[in-house]
Amino acid sequence: MALRGRVARRWSCIVNVLQGIFISAGALAAGAINFQPVLVAGKVPAEWIEAILWIKGSAGIVVPVAAFLTAFAASLKKIIGPKHIWDAVHTLLDDFREKAFSDSSFPHSNRVTLFKHQQLCFKLVAWKKMFSAEKKPIWGGWLVPVDRSGDVTQNPKIAFSAPKDRPDLAEGFAGKIWTTNTELFVEGLPLLERRLIGDPDGENKILRYCKSSYGSVDDIKKRLLSNQWCPRSFWGIHLESENGKVWGVLLIDSHEANLRNRSEIAEQFRTLANTFKALLKHI
Amino acid sequence: MATSNTGPKSLSGTVSAKATVSGTLTTTSDWIRLDVSHLNEVQKEEKGGITLESSLSPYDVPEAVRGHLDDPREWFVIEFRYITSEPTVEVGEDPVKILRGKRSGRIYQIRVRAPKSLPSEVEVPNMARKALDHLKRSGEQSFGPHRRINIIEHVLEEKREDLFGASRGPGSIREAFKSASFETTPKLTQAPGPLEPQPANVIQTTESRGSAKSGSALAAIDTRQS
């Protein structure tokens, strides 16, 4: 499932156009209901009259369907959020990444991801966790990635369980940040590779990685088996929107073992906190 | 952003730019910039040979502090400025009240009633410290990391002289309370009324952001008092 921010940035225009089409179709069909051919006979071509009569005949279906689709499109727009806000958020993430990794030229392996805390999560991973031994309900509270810096790795198949009533069960580094409302940082995590699975030393390495990054062993092994890399350093912070409400988590992950300018990252965040606050209340 | 250019003001002199925004008469009203990285101590935890570092969120560390007298001049207000603001609730009882963030529990203001006996510059910080101690112990009021309260205590100690010191001369807390005790009608030669609208150029100071924030907290007090 694509990131919400990406969906908003890419599909907002299309949803707008579709909504316009639905409204027009509904209005046309509603207008055709009272059409009387005798009033315009001889004044307009017969083909036109036939077409309007056809529309009139199908108005009973077209009007309610168009009304439903218009409402659906409006809801969709509301869910995905305004495109200009997402554009601004994405620019902010890119800028933040640029400052955090000023000397890096690998945007795919030095990323800034925005997680939103939401009660419901319909991502496949959440469904899987609900029906697995973990039994984490999709309505239990989740940290869901909604936007990420750069243009690559924009379809993360992740979501971290973060129940409000059981914060001790929060998953992952993002979950830990959300629970503690602190600034967390870890670096020098072991380099994990697929071949480590099954090897005693390798398993030990994976275990150490999971302990330090608050990850689950199963999730990490799944990542390795699907040939995804595991970050070697993390920095993260919770985000507040209006009135001090915790909105979600901002997470930096990197394949580099050391984040050299960690204090600068925190300082950079201080300057952007109010901008985040102003934008996040809209999405 | 250190202190503004207005400098310390005496009670009988004028009203600072920041004070006028919230309609509050001030003494040591200039924000004192705090060294955030110094205040926010990093805690390190070793896990399997890997060091995990945690520190208070930047939201929770004040970036500036100031002390001033509230308008009826019965309360000395120690005010903390953070990167964001939020609605506040009042906890504690007379003579020390604390304004905390409604959701976060961050300390935005400590309000200390003017002491009658001991020198103010000694008594006010002591009363504030006792209130903070009480806040730490109180289950109901101590939500949020205790490290935040420790930071507030540290700031009060570190900036004691700037906030309360007699060395500030006419702007000192002692002088302020003296005036409050003996002058029934303050000699405000050029001072506008507390709620008098201000010209735009007065508000456009280097501290306008902080003033706006403090204004919301002070407005909350004003509402309660009215």
Image (tube, helix red, strand yellow):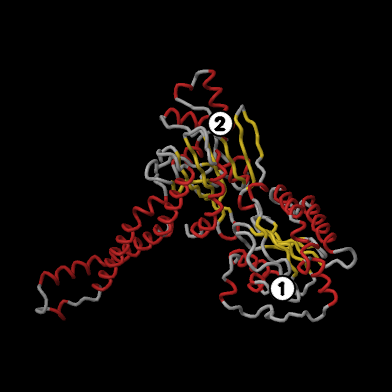
Looking at the rendered structure, the secondary structure element under dot 1 is loop
Numbered mark located on residue B25 in the image: 1
What is the x, y in percent for residue B131? 80, 57
As drawn, the residue found furthest toward the right would be B117
- The answer to which image quadrant residue A43 occupies is bottom left
Eyeballing the image, is B115 above or below B57? below
Of marks 1 and 2, the one in the foreground: 1
For label 1, count other residues whose C-alpha is less than 10 Å away and answer few (under 14), some (14-19) or many (20+): many
Quadrant position of residue B124: bottom right
Query: In the displayed structure, does residue A75 sit left or right of residue A63?
Result: right
Pinpoint residue A176: horizontal percent, then vertical percent: 59, 41
Point 24% across, 65% down: residue: A58
Kindly identify which residue carries mark 2: A210
Real-space CA distance between mark 1 and mark 2, rounded to the nearest whole angstrom: 55 Å
Q: Please say if A218 is above or below A80.
A: above
Say if A267 sits above or below B81 in the image. above
> Which subunit holds the residue at mark 2?
A
Query: Label 1 sits on what residue type?
Result: Leu
Is residue A61 visible in the rendered image? The answer is: no
Whether residue B196 can be seen here: yes
Label 2 sits on what residue type? Cys
**Residue at the (55%, 34%) spot, across then down:** A187
- Judging from the image, mark 1 belongs to the subunit labelled B
